[in-house]
Image (tube, coloured by chain):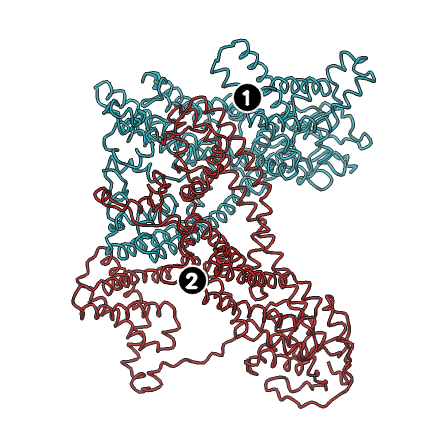
Chain colours: A red, B cyan
Amino acid sequence: MENHATSMYMPTAKAKHEHPSLVTKRSVKFTKKEDHPTVTINGLKEGIDQPDCPPANDHDLHKATTFVKDAKAGRNFKFKLDKVSLDFYDTYNRWYFVYLLYFFLFVIMALALFEDPAITNLELPIWTTMTIEFVCLCYFLFRLAHSKRCMSGIFWMGDIKNWIVLSVSVITLIDMVVYVILINKGKPWIRIVRILRPLFMMNFKETKDLRQAFRNIRRSLLGILSVLVLLFLVIGLFALLAREIFEDDVLLKPDASNYMSDYFENFWDLYVLVTTANSPDIMMPAYDASPWYMLFYIIYVILCIYIFMSIFLAVIYKDYRKHLKNEVQKSVFVKRRNLVYAWDLLKVWRGGAFVMPWQRWHALMKSVEPSKSILQLKLIWKVLDKDEDNNIDKRAFMKTADILNVKIIEKSRYVPIWEKHFPRVYNSAVSQIIVKGIKHKFFGWFFDLLIILNAGLIAFRISSIEWFFLTIFSLEIVFKLYALGFYRYFTNPWDVFDFTVIVLAVILSIAAKAAKDSNTLEQRSLDIILVLRVLRLVRIFNNFEKFQVIMKTLRNIGPSIFSFGGVILVIYYVYAIIGMELFAGKITYYGYPSEETTETFNKSLLYCGNQKLNGTEFYRDHYCNNNFNNVAKAYITLFELTIVNQWHDILCLIKCFFHVHPFPGQCL
Amino acid sequence: MENHATSMYMPTAKAKHEHPSLVTKRSVKFTKKEDHPTVTINGLKEGIDQPDCPPANDHDLHKATTFVKDAKAGRNFKFKLDKVSLDFYDTYNRWYFVYLLYFFLFVIMALALFEDPAITNLELPIWTTMTIEFVCLCYFLFRLAHSKRCMSGIFWMGDIKNWIVLSVSVITLIDMVVYVILINKGKPWIRIVRILRPLFMMNFKETKDLRQAFRNIRRSLLGILSVLVLLFLVIGLFALLAREIFEDDVLLKPDASNYMSDYFENFWDLYVLVTTANSPDIMMPAYDASPWYMLFYIIYVILCIYIFMSIFLAVIYKDYRKHLKNEVQKSVFVKRRNLVYAWDLLKVWRGGAFVMPWQRWHALMKSVEPSKSILQLKLIWKVLDKDEDNNIDKRAFMKTADILNVKIIEKSRYVPIWEKHFPRVYNSAVSQIIVKGIKHKFFGWFFDLLIILNAGLIAFRISSIEWFFLTIFSLEIVFKLYALGFYRYFTNPWDVFDFTVIVLAVILSIAAKAAKDSNTLEQRSLDIILVLRVLRLVRIFNNFEKFQVIMKTLRNIGPSIFSFGGVILVIYYVYAIIGMELFAGKITYYGYPSEETTETFNKSLLYCGNQKLNGTEFYRDHYCNNNFNNVAKAYITLFELTIVNQWHDILCLIKCFFHVHPFPGQCL
């Protein structure tokens, strides 16, 4: 590669996937050849001469920087390419603006805690919540306007997400105005529009993971639609069959109602049976009448629970994999496209091919990652520039974004603080033997053994030698701090956990001792800390390979679990708002009278404060607290419904208050 | 391939996986060249002359036949190669001997229905069941002896399955003798040895599928052992945490017992919670005391139910796939080995390579599949012999077993019986138009519509025009029979289903009409038939592609489901026998008194005939029929436990009768 000819700069429009605004802008050709300050690069091959290469002009560099940054962050934003828009876009992506968005998203969702019906003691006046909501909306609209400024109009208009945010904001504002007017006139207004708030969560570009997870779920659900239809058809047929089989016997349920005599009630009961929630209760009356009737249920259960549910799982698994693959492919495609734009802006014609010389790459990287040292950039360059000619080809350039995301740590020998300040003492023969002993595996095993012993004693409530254990575990911390130094000790999560638990235990023990009286708060904290110490047992499991695999798996699937947790919280939110508007205050927990106190118990507080619940399973099972009186209670109720068991009893609420026919409950 | 030289017969010992008994036997060389009757083969290329080829001698052919038969059936049996043993082995594989084995296996399992505690009205005297069991054992031992005769001693001895069958037989015989002696002395003896009976099911060569499925499950379970240990550790930790958190509040359960105060009871409750069976009941007392307590349960549920259970599923899925792959590989290997043996016996050296000429292959096939016609064999040969030189190489020969398993049907134009006997009438213009009309898709759609209409009317109990539908559906059958003829109509399962349902409905309707009084039996059969007619709706779904995919999936996974169903029935059997020995007669269903009849109800029959159940959830939920009083009831109880819901209430039996500490129930 001894090409000394003046490098040709050939901007082409060959990029496969054109950013349309780019095409128009790129016709501005770069022709002037300027001198540029030579960058002295230590460590790069000095033998190969650096052919002159015009530095990219500032605007191109700016554009390329923005493209690489987007590729690195996985963004897909079609910004305008003029200088002012690029500056705006840089501002748009500043971390404080982004985090402010997250903050306001959190705030607008959390408002439900303070709005009527609020959590006890957390009620805020309407004006406060309204003002907060208004501030949130203003920021959302500002953010929207900001993105509009960076994007060419057509792209902004074409993105349905922007319209959703805009229209939800407008609807919310209108709703707020209406609410304020009506409340002043003394008329109540249901703020059902709050169920639209999750749409903010889903429709900003910054919440891509959540949106992706939601889209994946939605698409997978479409896949099972046909199986679902078939399942309901089968349930419908069995409901009919049940009516014909059982009704002539005039069987009775334990609550003396007719067994399987109404078609819709049969359908409901059999649907509940698919979730196993009313098994075996629903079968017992038939079983009592004749064992042969059980054949009906056995066939039904095998078909609907075991076979259909397995098919559901298989279909969802397959569909989900497929959609996930598509999503990953799409994001790789977007990343490559951004990199291709950056490449096209900075490439240089040299030696019969387009290449990216070190000078330009370095200039690009300096503005993409100002925090990276020249040493780190050289390391990355070494990885990319395999043939060491100080030029990289397109293929190598495409790896840039991924390599930038690899964390590079400059490692140097770490010296414990003791060694730094008291080298003579720390490095003496005796001290070194101690350090070696502490670092020896037997030291670890010995304390593992003590932890097991301690856990056993805690389990069997032998607390007389608690102080001995506390002392010895405190000593362990001191020893380890001496051997490892502060930095290394406190960067190991297990050690931090140990430290926290033991130090808390020591402090609380001393406090409890000092107080002398049975101060419940301190005693109970101590009890819990005691058990947290038992959790240190998990540290011992870390010695087993199988356990490490499980922990690693959990760490790997963590991000997906969080995305889906987010989706679930969002779905809960919608249901919680609806539930609160419909059911708030209808059922309240006032305690349950025991047999002795029945007489003296306030009659109006009986049956969760609602006479309709008299005689229901719901009340009998003491479910009064499963209500929608505030957001927290609503979430807990929804969580219990998610676990599925006894959900039909909880849902009896609906029947109780609306007498809806297809949802039979035991309400009288 | 004009090789007219005398063909060389070169028995070698080059087969990769030597059947050791084969090596010794194969030294008997075949040297004499005999004339053989030429087989005239129509359709084979007459141009290529058939070089003389010595026919395989009868013994080699016999051996090869046996090997191919084993390959075809997927058997792995190391039989001896002398003529007598081969004859014995042929007898051993006769279908009636095999089916007799299946029959006796079924009989010995089914004996549990008739042995004490027997199903009501099915009790047989001890001597009868004993005799039947003895006959079964005799057949098993005969079968074992038969297999011993066909196998060389070392192989037979080396197979653990034979020893299991033998020892279980001996143990059962001893148990029977002891039982008879003790029963004569008036002492009861628990026939717990019956739990060994499933071992017969698993350890005959003929029940390979069941054994394979069982092995697969066993191995997959080993894979989750580490996750299981971790799960129990986590439950143990949470149980400890629960005690420390909740005990100071002195919370009460609805039954007024202390909440979460005993470690083992906590462990049990939290373990039940993992199966969701006691959710949300177990959480409610804590929730009532403080909503913050719910955090404990929410963390626990997410960790143990959602994360751990998903990991379980993933690990089992992965392990199961792996083991299944191994099993398939192994069975392919066994099949190939058998075919290699057959190939080595019959191959001929010709044209520089070993080949199998048509003559030998044909002779082999004639004895492997006497039922196949020469036409079918020629078709198979045509598939194998690609270059049409009347010889196949080893690779083609290896496909033999698989191709023999492909079903070949000789298809000829089918003529409806009407056309055969009344050709003039049937082929007349009018008749042909009618036939075309019946075969037209609109004909089908019209009747589909009628089925939907009929189903709707049945669902809404509009029975006045039942006769109209019956008539028109009967006409449909007549029409279809006319157009398609008997054979084609009755080979379509949907048509057979239609026919059965409609004809039964007509007969029963007429019978009900004739009886005139409200004969419940006929009326109810009619009701059920009515609903079965609704099942014809499923036929309509068959028009949709998605549904066909589901049906096909079900058909494909059917065999595996049956194998696993078998495994489950076997496991149930063991538990049923143990349960019957422990619990038979302790709980009996005597009905539940209503409020009016409580006074007059026989006191000794209250609470399932067991005063200990007074006040338990078990009795309150009317679960008395969930007992182990006979095999059928035991199976149903186990089935209900499998569905998981309310299983802890059913298991309260154990606590009731044995006061086992780790199984708390609500027994008083």
Identify whether B458 is placed above or below B395. Answer: above
Calculate the distance from the C-alpha at mark 2 to the C-alpha at mark 1. Answer: 60 Å
Q: Position of residue B419 (x, y in %)?
A: 77, 15
Q: Disc 2 marks which amino acid?
A: Phe
Where does the C terminus of chain A fall, quadrant-wise? Answer: top left
- Answer yes or no: do the residues labelled 2 and 1 have beta carbons within 8 Å? no
Res A385 → quadrant = bottom right
Residue bearing mark 2: A114
User: What residue lies at 66% left-to-right and 86% top-to-bottom?
Assistant: A47
Q: Is residue B349 visible?
A: yes
Identify whether A582 is placed above or below A229. Answer: below
| Label 2 SS | loop
User: What residue lies at 44% left-to-right and 49% top-to-bottom?
Assistant: A642
Residue bearing mark 1: B529
Identify whether A474 is placed above or below B573. Answer: below
Chain of the residue under label 1:
B
Query: Dot 1 surroundings within 10 Å: few (below 14), some, or many (20 or more)?
Result: many
Q: Disc 1 marks which amino acid?
A: Ile
Chain of the residue under label 2:
A
Where does the N terminus of chain A fall, quadrant-wise? Answer: bottom right
Query: Dot 2 surroundings within 10 Å: few (below 14), some, or many (20 or more)?
Result: many
Left or right of A216 in this view: A262: left
In the image shown, does A429 or B440 lie closer to the viewer?
A: B440
In the image shown, does A377 or B238 lie closer to the viewer?
A: B238
In the image shown, does B255 or B153 lie closer to the viewer?
A: B255
Pair 2/1: label in front = 2
